Amino acid sequence: MTAMTAGTTNVVVLISGSGTNLQALIDARDRGVLNAELCAVISNRPDAYGLQRAERAAIATEVLDHTAFASRDAFDAAMAALIDGYRPDLVVLAGFMRILTPAFVQRYAGRMLNIHPSLLPKYQGLHTHRRALEAGDREHGVTVHFVTEELDGGPAVIQARVPVRPGDTVETLANRVRQQEHIIYPMAVQWFSAARLRMADNRSWLDGEPLPRHGYLIDNTG
């Protein structure tokens, strides 16, 4: 890991698709509210639209096609070698649709963030919006968390809650959640970049104090 001082964090972003959260990070950087170097965007899918977003923002891009590897372990080892070439302080998963091996997760323990579209620990895994609607939930949301070996189970950093409204569909609920994603992910990355955020004892700590289990809460349900 490179030596880190506030505001000089090197960030590698991993994507698999359209890259809307990547765009939120780029926009925050360009507005001057994210003081971090987005040094590379890496995709496991050659056709990921997020690669074009990175290229337009003059960020280095790499493609490592997971279908070319015989095993998950082999892919993750190659991915780690590619990431390490950029000497990142932080690895950001922004719609990276791969289950990571324990060795990969341990390599970046305490310096890898993910965003998940639910109020964790509810609805780990896929189809979170549909599951929230089917359960009759009155609120839903999104969580930024540190990555651990448990899928979507690492310590929460920030949660944003949104209401579930009468007549909501998966699409309308997803759009409401996505708006919050684009707010809270740059916030979390900036906290890390400013040396305010860390993981210790399987908790997230902000400014030297342990965060609640749900992380810093932004409540939009009122």
Image (tube, rainbow, N blue to C red):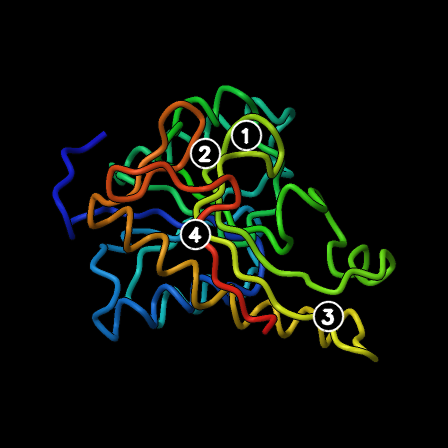
* Disc 2/disc 1 C-alpha distance (Å): 6 Å
* Disc 3/disc 4 C-alpha distance (Å): 21 Å
Q: Residues within 10 Å of mark 4 (few under 14, many from 20)?
A: some
| Residue 50, visible in the rendered structure | no
Helix, strand or loop at disc 1?
Answer: helix
Q: Nearer the viewer, mark 4 or mark 1?
A: 4
Q: Nearer the viewer, residue 84 or 104?
A: 104
Q: Nearer the viewer, residue 107 or 187?
A: 187
Quadrant containing the C terminus is bottom right
* Disc 4/disc 1 C-alpha distance (Å): 34 Å
User: What amino acid type is highlighted by mark number 1?
Assistant: Phe
Residue designated by label 3: 164
Residue designated by label 4: 216
* Residue 33 image offset from top left, x and y in percent: 24, 68
Q: Nearer the viewer, mark 1 or mark 3?
A: 3
Q: Residues within 10 Å of mark 2 (few under 14, many from 20)?
A: many
Identify the mark nearer the N-term, 4 or 2: 2
User: Residue at position x 36%, y 36% from top?
Assistant: 210
Query: CB of mark 2 within 8 Å of CB of mark 1?
Result: yes
Residue 160 vs 90, above or below: the answer is below
**Numbered circle sitting on residue 79:** 2
Residue 75 vs 165, above or below: the answer is above
Q: Is residue 24 left or right of residue 213?
A: left
Q: Nearer the viewer, residue 84 or 222?
A: 222
